Each structure stands twice: as C-alpha cells, then as structure tokens.
Amino acid sequence: MNEELKENIMGALELVIDPELGVDIVNLGLVYNAEMDDEGNVTITMTLTSMGCPLAGTIVDQVKRALADIPEIKGVEVNIVFNPPWTKEMMSRYAKIALGIR
C-alpha cells in the first residue's frame, strides 16, 4: 500500500470516536497497523482501552463504515488484539490534552 493511501486510511479512522472517551481511535493510540492485500482487502489491527470494552462491536462497525468510502478498499477486517496492551503513553499529545492527562 502506498503512503498516500495509508494516510487516507488513518485520516478516515480519525473520524472514529471512542464513545466512552470522546477522542478518535488514532489519537488514542488504539490503531496499531493497517495492511492491504492485492485484492484491496484491508486489515486494521487495533486494540481497545480495556479487554471488557462493552462498545467493541460499535467501534468495529464505525471502523468499517469510515473506510467504506475509500475507493481502493474492497473489504475491511478488524483484528482486535491486546498485545501489546494499550497504555496512556500510546496517546498523541492532542489526546492527552483533550483528556487532561499529563
């Protein structure tokens, strides 16, 4: 996948807001990787802020909807992982400021 397409994917994922925290999943550091195969199927490897996140299904659906408008993408798979575990150090400066974390 070229860099422009990867930027488009990450930009679209910035529209996916974690419903509990009110900050997008990219700035929260929840998205670990985006890969595309030769057929245009994208796999998003991401985590959640906690293993028992009750809104996991909602976030996965939002990820798929956010990427649906990118013409190069034919399908989306969301791979939820918990290794490495998410920590607040993975958040961007923007997310830390928005949540009042130092």
Image (cartoon, rainbow, N blue to C red):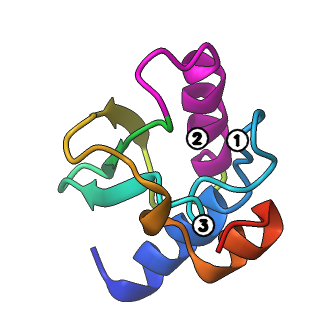
Residue 52 within the magenta-colored segment of the rendering: yes
Distance between the alpha carbons at the discs numbered 3 and 2: 14 Å
Q: Residues within 10 Å of mark 1 (few under 14, many from 20)?
A: many
Farthest residue in the front direction? 102
Return the x and y of residue 1 as percentages of the image width and height: 27, 73
Work out whether 102 lies above or below 51: below
Q: Which residue is mark 1?
A: 18
Work out whether 27 lies above or below 65: below
Work out whether 25 lies above or below 77: below
Residue located 45% across and 86% down the image: 4
Tag 1, which secondary structure? Answer: loop
Distance between the alpha carbons at the discs numbered 3 and 1: 10 Å
Q: Nearer the viewer, residue 1 or 50?
A: 50
In the rendered structure, which disc, 3 or 1, sits on the residue that comes first in sequence?
1
Return the x and y of residue 75 as percentages of the image width and height: 41, 38
What range of the chain is rendered magenta?
50-68
Q: Which residue is mark 2?
A: 63
Residue 3 within the magenta-colored segment of the rendering: no
Q: Amino acid at mark 1?
A: Asp
Judged by its main secondary structure, the magenta piece is: helix
Seen in the image, is 48 located left or right of residue 78? right
Q: Which residue is mark 3?
A: 27
Identify the image quadrant of residue 72: bottom left
Return the x and y of residue 88 as percentages of the image width and height: 50, 58
Distance between the alpha carbons at the discs numbered 2 and 1: 11 Å
Residue located 71% across and 78% down the image: 94
Q: Nearer the viewer, residue 81 or 70?
A: 81
Residue located 61% across and 26% down the image: 61
Q: Residues within 10 Å of mark 3 (few under 14, many from 20)?
A: some
Q: Amino acid at mark 3?
A: Asn
Seen in the image, is 13 located left or right of residue 43? right
